[in-house]
Amino acid sequence: MTAIYLDNNATTRTDPSVVEAMLPYFSESFGNASSAHSFGASVGEAVKAARQQLQALLGAAHDHEIIYTSGGTESDNAAILSALEAMPDRNEIVTSKVEHPAILSLCEHLEKTGRAKVHFIGVDKLGQLDIEAYRAALSDKVAIVSLMWANNETGTIFPIEGLAELAKQHGALFHTDAVQAAGKTSIVLKDSAIDMLSLSGHKLHGPKGIGALYVKKGVRFKPLIRGGHQERARRGGTENVPAIIGLGKAAELALAHMAEEQGRVKEMRDRLEKAVLQRVPNCLVNGDRNDRLPNTLNLAFEYVESEAILLHLNRAGVAASSGSACTSGSMEPSHVLKAMEVPEAALHGAVRFSFSRDNQASDVDRVIETLPPIVEKLREMSPFWADAEKKTNDKPVFA
Ligand SMILES: *Cc1c(COP(=O)(O)O)cnc(C)c1O
């Protein structure tokens, strides 16, 4: 029995053709991309070609708007720290309560050390931003707004272009963490109000430890990592050439497979959602079912611990997650679901299934077969379930 991987929001399998594209850059094409001699020149060309592949994925106007980084976390940190330095007369940041720790823990640190005042905007029950609170937080003191394009735990998509336009009205820079959106949904940055955007290789079938930060032409940028003149002096350090080539190839493939994400991948996700809601009582969907990544399904099972479900699923050969990889393994419920005010009974029973183009219809069949009996068995052992069943026997089932 081969194991089924449904944790693609945590990381994806590197596409075999990405690996193939990378291999020569470990051996015969080992030159330094910045060297002037023949060993470097061809490598420099390949690094430029990869930049153009990313430009195409993002619909960016210029390839030099792309800066290679070590991944999503570095891109997020670089964007925020750059804005604070580039706009010394502004010291406020606006972000949301449901961001990835790459943004949240940096913002908490900046606030604690007195380097910035941070507005953490809340969300509603679907995980959508509180627009009134967002408008109220914007002012000419805000250096940067950083809001994620799509949430890694629930897949909820923010109306990012409109949010960026509001930020611009106050002269603030606008950054979006698009690590989950890139490759799953169409992005066109040319003529957009978005100034900066983060993406990561390993979330789109590329290698780990490589990512990119898009910085719109004309936006002032202060480097996070200073050193040589690589990346037009915006990110020092010898280029990670094999990973850059892999990221470029992954971007090209993501663009080519975009319709499949919105088609076949979404169909698998929708079929799983429908089947589980039909078969399992007291189960709800976390996130905005109308504005959601096509690959993500976050289900909350009342009166069961997600860790117990995941353990049994893993034994049955199904790999899923309780949300962000960083919160799983601890008993602390997800900060995203807490911000969404998911009811207490469901807060501890959330399971995230995240698909990719690597999944097959038979994977969905397996989960539909294995998941309902696991939840049923665990509930039979729960005293809370026995109580709840007595109380809610004639209450309609969520569907
Ligand atoms: C995974 C992830 C990151 C971090 O990216 P790394 O490349 O792993 O550093 C940032 N933001 C979101 C939304 C993510 O899902």
Image: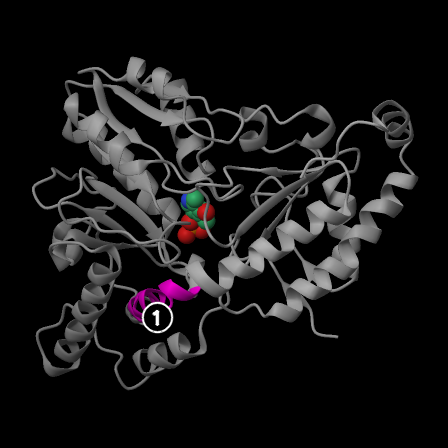
Q: Position of residue 385 (x, y in %)?
A: 86, 32
Name the residue: 44% across, 31% down: 105
- Left or right relative to 140: residue 328: right
Q: Is mark 1 within 8 Å of ligand 1?
A: no
Q: Position of residue 68 (x, y in %)?
A: 26, 56
Which stretch appears magenta?
A: 247-260
Q: Position of residue 349 (x, y in %)?
A: 72, 37
User: To which quarter of the image does residue 6 belong?
Assistant: bottom right
Name the residue: 18% across, 71% down: 49
Q: Quadrant of the C terminus?
A: top right
Q: Report the front residue among 31 and 105.
A: 105
Q: Report the front residue among 283 and 196.
A: 283
Is 18 magenta? The answer is: no
Q: Position of residue 334 (x, y in %)?
A: 60, 33
Name the residue: 20% across, 42% down: 223
Res. 67 in view:
yes
Q: Report the front residue among 96 and 234.
A: 96
Name the residue: 15% across, 74% down: 45
Q: Quadrant of the N terminus?
A: bottom right
Q: Amino acid at mark 1?
A: Leu
Name the residue beneath numbered marker 1: 253
User: To which quarter of the image does residue 186 belong?
Assistant: bottom left
Residue 126 drawn above or below residue 131: below
- Left or right relative to 288: residue 229: left
